[in-house]
Image: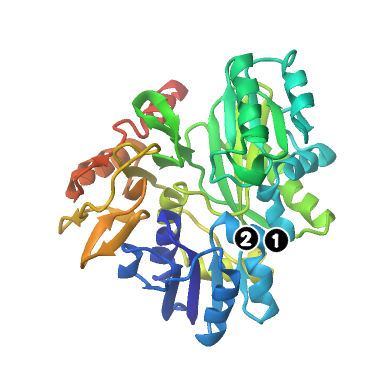
Amino acid sequence: MKIMVVGGGGREHAIIKKIKKSPLAEEIYALPGNGGIAADATCVNIGAKDIEGIVRFALDNKIDYAIVAPDDPLVLGAVDALNEVGIPCFGPKACAAIIEGSKIFSKNLMKKYGIPTAAYEVFTELEPAVEYLKSAPIPTVIKADGLALGKGVVIAMTREEAIEAVYSMMQDKVFGASGSKIVIEEFLTGPEVSVLAFTDGKTVVPMVSSMDHKRALDNDQGLNTGGMGTIAPNPYYTDDVAAICMDKIFVPTINAMTQEGRTFKGCLYFGLMLTPDGPKVIEYNCRFGDPETQVVLPLLDGDLLEIMMACTNGTLADTEVRFMDSSACCVIMASAGYPGKYDGGYEITVEDGIEAEVYFAGAKFDGGKLVNAGGRVLGVTAIGDNLADAINKAYANVPKVNFANAYYRKDIGARALRAYIDNK
């Protein structure tokens, strides 16, 4: 089969490395891919949001199956457009991708169907939002309604910060049209858990849980980023918690979407907070998370392409999905200065004999050399018999990857290790 993967980050590299192992995959194309992905797939210089170009390429090259990985093309209707010309896809149609494309939609869906989430108010104009914040409980959470590269959320610890965030989104348009409508949400406390789930719209199969590390600096300090590293499984996500989530959140969400005429097929990401009142949904994503994918898929014990096609064909209930009884750790290596200003163009080298997977994100070829070309450049992922083993292996292999202004956190997984100790 000829497979086309839309996207060009670390998540897409992890997907490509996994489906490359499938006997069903004969040729793999990445649109646009990146310099590191080029070692595992044929990269084509067509942007992930160029829906017309993607469809034209798929037809011209007789693509048998497409995987649309990022949020933007999903919300823009890439799956719809490919389906219209007869190409089956992994990923939701636009009417279902709205679960990530609009925070207001997802919050209203949860309220309507009794899915546990934070209390919230919706605002479409600046003045009422500011007026509300003058007496709202603090801390509070301000969210832009639309897509904002994972950055459209402000946790305001003071009333001044909250009002400033509203002006920034609604008046200054820091997130463009995405911030023209906002959600102001109750501040929840508790451990955060990410759970990705395969679904064909009828059956939902959660993958192994994970823990992201969003802050740029050690000890969860510094600015928010797209994610500086991940571990799996998440120690806070016990069997008892998993059973509650399946019963109260996962199945009800899939059923709610079907009830709304928005059947969701693909990967649904559940961002959860384990509050004193039980698990609650912080956010939904309509696709694999990044960098969660870089620890979840290495633990998948089976044929990813086969599972994806079962999601598309509605046969997930008849398909075995297994995960290894192991742990994984991914350390993101970024360009120094990220998520602020950073320099690119430094050559990336990987030593022979590295005992970890390297998933490339912000990398390109320049003058025949692979160089850094983004904030988050790559992720180094190792698998171990237990979490401590996985963390040690990941950090032992990070020095085997080099570029001049590399920066990475030194404490990925430390919080999870403490949780394991506390749980004993």
Q: Amino acid at mark 1?
A: Ala
Residue 150 vs residue 319, the one in the foreground:
150
Q: For mark 2, what is the residue?
A: 74
Q: Which quadrant holds residue 141?
A: top right
Q: Which quadrant holds residue 360?
A: bottom left
Residue 57 vs residue 308, the one in the foreground:
57
Count of marks overlaid on the render: 2
| Marks 2,1: beta carbons within 8 A | yes
Q: For mark 1, what is the residue?
A: 94
Q: Is residue 411 above or below residue 102?
A: above
**Percent from the top left, x then y, of residue 340?**
39, 36
Tell me how far mark 2 sits from mark 1, CA to CA: 6 Å
Looking at the rendered structure, the secondary structure element under dot 1 is: helix
Q: Residue at x 28, y 45 (%)?
A: 343
Residue 79 vs residue 127, the one in the foreground:
127
Residue 202 visible: no
**Percent from the top left, x then y, of residue 265?**
67, 62
**Percent from the top left, x then y, of residue 219?**
37, 24
Q: Is residue 376 left or right of residue 114?
A: left
Q: How is the image coloured?
A: rainbow
Q: Residue at x 54, y 57 (%)?
A: 70
Looking at the rendered structure, the secondary structure element under dot 2 is: helix
**Percent from the top left, x then y, of residue 262?**
78, 58
Residue 222 vs residue 245, the one in the foreground:
222
Q: Amino acid at mark 2?
A: Leu
Q: Is residue 13 left or right of residue 78?
A: left
